[in-house]
């Protein structure tokens, strides 16, 4: 199982935003590309454990699709929206902190928001909830 969040972004990912998100995730976190490079694993340098999986972004073009999938709180977002899932490991205590910081930095830079399956992650990471 994982702790899930979705960065909903109005602008597409770029290298500068991803680099800033890595810095925001924390000094003890590094990333490796997996598969064809569309997804990332975030690693804890000290423990050598994967703390989060960042999936490749998907462009949502269908009106109403975000609300159907995530609920009323995202109904104000009009497509096109880039959907980027971040899954923090439940096996690593505190993994939601770098995962949410990564997603939050992307949402700040790329004009978006972060949806979380549990708003308590924001408090754990020292960020405001939704």
Image: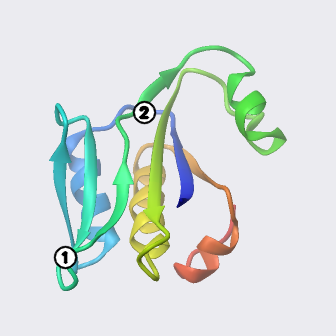
Residue found at x 48% / y 65%: 100
Specify the label residue 11 is tagged with. 2
Residue found at x 57% / y 15%: 61
Q: Where is residue 10 in the image (x, y as percent from the top left)?
A: 50, 33
Specify the label residue 48 is tagged with. 1
As displayed, is residue 89 above or below residue 72? below
Which class describes the residues within 10 Å of circle 2: few (<14), some (14-19), or many (20+)? some
Q: Quadrant of residue 15?
A: top left
Measured in 3D between alpha carbons, the distance from the residue under mark 1 to the one under mark 2, in whole angstroms, is 32 Å
Label 1 vs 2, first from the N-terminus: 2
Residue found at x 48% / y 60%: 104
As displayed, is residue 100 above or below residue 62? below
Q: Which of marks 1 and 2 is in front?
A: 1
Q: Which residue lies furthest to the right in this view?
A: 72
Q: How many marks?
A: 2
Q: Where is residue 111 in the image (x, y as percent from the top left)?
A: 50, 43
Residue found at x 79% / y 45%: 73
As displayed, is residue 78 above or below residue 129? above
């Amino acid at each position: 199982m994982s702790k899930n969040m979705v960065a909903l972004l109005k602008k597409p990912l770029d290298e500068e935003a991803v680099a800033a998100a890595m810095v925001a995730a924390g000094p003890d976190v590094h990333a490796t590309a997996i598969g064809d490079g569309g997804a990332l694993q975030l690693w804890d340098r000290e423990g050598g454990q994967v703390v989060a999986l960042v999936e490749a972004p998907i462009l949502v073009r269908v009106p109403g699709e975000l609300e159907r999938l995530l609920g009323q709180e995202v109904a104000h977002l009009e497509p096109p929206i880039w959907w980027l899932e971040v899954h923090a490991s439940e096996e690593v205590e505190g993994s939601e902190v770098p995962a949410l910081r990564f997603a939050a930095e992307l949402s700040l830079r790329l004009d978006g928001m972060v949806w979380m399956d549990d708003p308590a992650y924001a408090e754990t990471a020292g960020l405001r909830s939704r």
